[in-house]
Image (cartoon, rainbow, N blue to C red):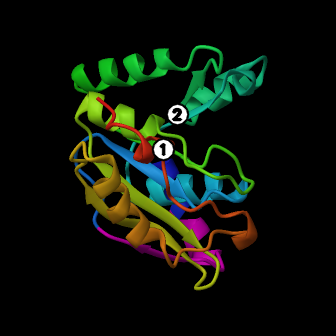
Amino acid sequence: MLRRGLARLYWAFSRWKFVSEPAPTRPTILIGAPHTSNWDFVLMLAIAWRLGIPVRWLGKDSLFAGWRGPIMRGLGGIAVDRANPQNVVAEVVARVHAGEVFGLVVTPEGTRGKGEFWKSGFYRIARDADMPVTLGYVDRTTMTTGLGPTIDLTGDVSADMDVIRAYYVDKAGMRPENRTIPRLREEQTPPLS
């Protein structure tokens, strides 16, 4: 209730316009893209809190060290050991199979700077946990942010990414020059299992 109230207050005074399709009602991967600034995180929390979506998000384990740990976990953070990232997939799948309903916020660009490919972890988690993908966005050109459609992945990486690319084609992010085109390295290799 407090989070939802804070989010309403934020949106009332924000220069950003909140635009959203209905909130998903089952566990979902919430893509945060284009991820070109640390402010993307604040906007995604404000979106989720406004819609009443319990969120989880992945962060490098160093963010959870010391006094920051309880705060980060309280905000829904799940620490990722970058040397052993496959454990996080198993943890998320276990949470879904245990009946937990949440939106897992993932920034597939993996960095706030321009890259060549998106990271495919969101795709593997969605397929392994049988979770849909909800396309969250930030678009500085229109000063809008929110949630777009929720899609079920088919396992055909190229076809699924074509749908995702089509949605993000006109979304610029906070810093358009840092935007990475939605493309997975796996599109050039056999499909992910």
Circles 1, 2 touching at the beta carbon (< 8 Å)? yes
Determine whether, in the image, residue 11 is placed left or right of residue 113: left
Is the residue 143 above or below the residue 167 in the image? below
Q: How many marks?
A: 2
> Between 88 and 96, which is closer to the camera in this rendering?
88
Q: Which residue is mark 2?
A: 76
Counting from the top left corner in percent of width and height, residue 121 is at: 47, 35
70 magenta-colored: no
Helix, strand or loop for disc 1: strand
Counting from the top left corner in percent of width and height, residue 80 is at: 59, 22
Q: Amino acid at mark 2?
A: Gly
**Residues in magenta?**
8-21
Q: Which residue is mark 1?
A: 105
Q: Amino acid at mark 1?
A: Val
Please name the residue shown 38% across and 40% down the image: 123
Which of the marked residues, 1 or 2, is nearer the chain's N terminus?
Answer: 2
> Between 73 and 61, which is closer to the camera in this rendering?
61
Foreground label between 1 and 2: 1
Query: Most extreme residue toward the front, as rendered?
Result: 189
> Can you tell which mark lies on residue 146?
none
Residue 97 picture quarter: top left
